[in-house]
């Protein structure tokens, strides 16, 4: 975190960001570190979380909110719209109303977990959403894949619904669509091209 934080602060500063955004970024990196610590604790305690707990934590550790924020910072009123220069970053990083960002994170996480499960998981990782689903529902991996693919479709519906119903968010929804398309590039066919 120590080496990454100054890099992000420089990026934000270089995009005419304000000191408040930089402070928010520092706080967000501290939160992100806490989320990763929780995952490490689960791993070291051999804890198998519920599917919902795993998804809630893994969408936070996915970094999708930071990627989304990084792709929108410095793009001006086209993206920030009514949020203003200081309003977009808190909305992306903290708002539970940022369902488009959460949907993007879930799609990326689910697709990554399915590809990682097919490839063979890293022994030093916390349990994936696939493993948690199998454990919680006592099903085979094939059934878990179908269920998780259904969840991916549901998250796409969330993104598309925002595209048509929340016109003020359209520039940000378009960013979410672009980020989410990269997940399909990396994980198409349940393989990991990353």
Image (cartoon, rainbow, N blue to C red):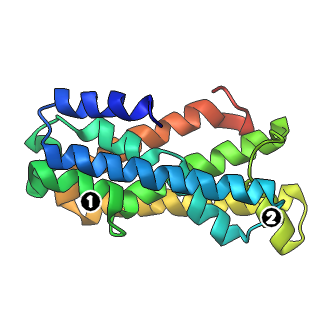
Task: Name above or below for residue 66 compared with residue 10.
Answer: below
Residue 151 visible, this angle:
yes
Q: Position of residue 135 (x, y in %)?
A: 85, 67
Residue 44 horizontal side relative to residue 164, left or right: right
- In front: 48, or 23? 23
Quadrant of residue 83 in the image? bottom left
Q: Quadrant of the C terminus?
A: top right
SS class, disc 2: loop
Residue 172 horizontal side relative to residue 144, left or right: left
Quadrant of residue 102 in the image? bottom left
Indicate which disc residue 105 carries.
none
Tell me the residue at 64%/46% (across/down).
111
Q: Which residue is mark 1?
A: 91
Q: Position of residue 29 (x, y in %)?
A: 41, 47
Q: Position of residue 154 (x, y in %)?
A: 54, 64
- In front: 116, or 139? 116
Tell me the residue at 60%/49% (across/down).
109
Q: Are marks 1 and 2 in contact (CB under 8 Å)?
A: no
Tell me the residue at 51%/60% (across/down).
155
How crowded pointer 1 is (Cα within 10 Å; few <14, some 14-19, many 20+) is rated as some
Q: Residue furthest front?
A: 2
Label 1, label 2: how far apart the Cα atoms are = 32 Å
Q: Position of residue 146 (x, y in %)?
A: 75, 59
First in residue order: circle 1 vs circle 2: 2
Q: Which residue is mark 2?
A: 47
Quadrant of residue 72 in the image? top left
How crowded pointer 2 is (Cα within 10 Å; few <14, some 14-19, many 20+) is rated as few
SS class, disc 1: helix
Number of the front mark, 1 or 2: 2
Residue 160 visible, this angle:
no
Residue 178 horizontal side relative to residue 113, left or right: left
């Amino acid at each position: 975190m120590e080496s990454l934080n100054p890099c992000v602060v420089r990026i934000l500063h270089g995009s005419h960001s304000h000191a408040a955004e930089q402070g928010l970024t520092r706080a967000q990196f501290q939160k992100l570190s806490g989320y990763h610590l929780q995952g490490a604790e689960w791993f070291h305690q051999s804890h198998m979380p519920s599917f919902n707990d795993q998804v809630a934590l893994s969408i936070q550790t996915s970094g999708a909110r930071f990627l989304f924020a990084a792709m929108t910072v410095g793009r001006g009123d086209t993206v920030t719209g009514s949020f203003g220069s200081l309003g977009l970053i808190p909305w992306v990083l903290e708002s539970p109303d940022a369902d488009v960002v959460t949907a993007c994170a879930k799609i990326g996480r689910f697709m990554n977990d399915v590809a990682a499960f097919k490839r063979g998981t890293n022994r030093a990782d916390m349990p994936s959403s696939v493993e948690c689903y199998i454990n919680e529902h006592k099903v085979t991996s094939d059934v878990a894949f179908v269920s998780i693919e259904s969840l991916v479709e549901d998250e796409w519906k969330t993104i598309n619904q925002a595209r048509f119903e929340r016109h003020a968010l359209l520039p940000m929804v378009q960013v979410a669509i672009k980020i989410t398309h990269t997940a399909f590039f990396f994980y198409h066919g349940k393989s990991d091209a990353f």
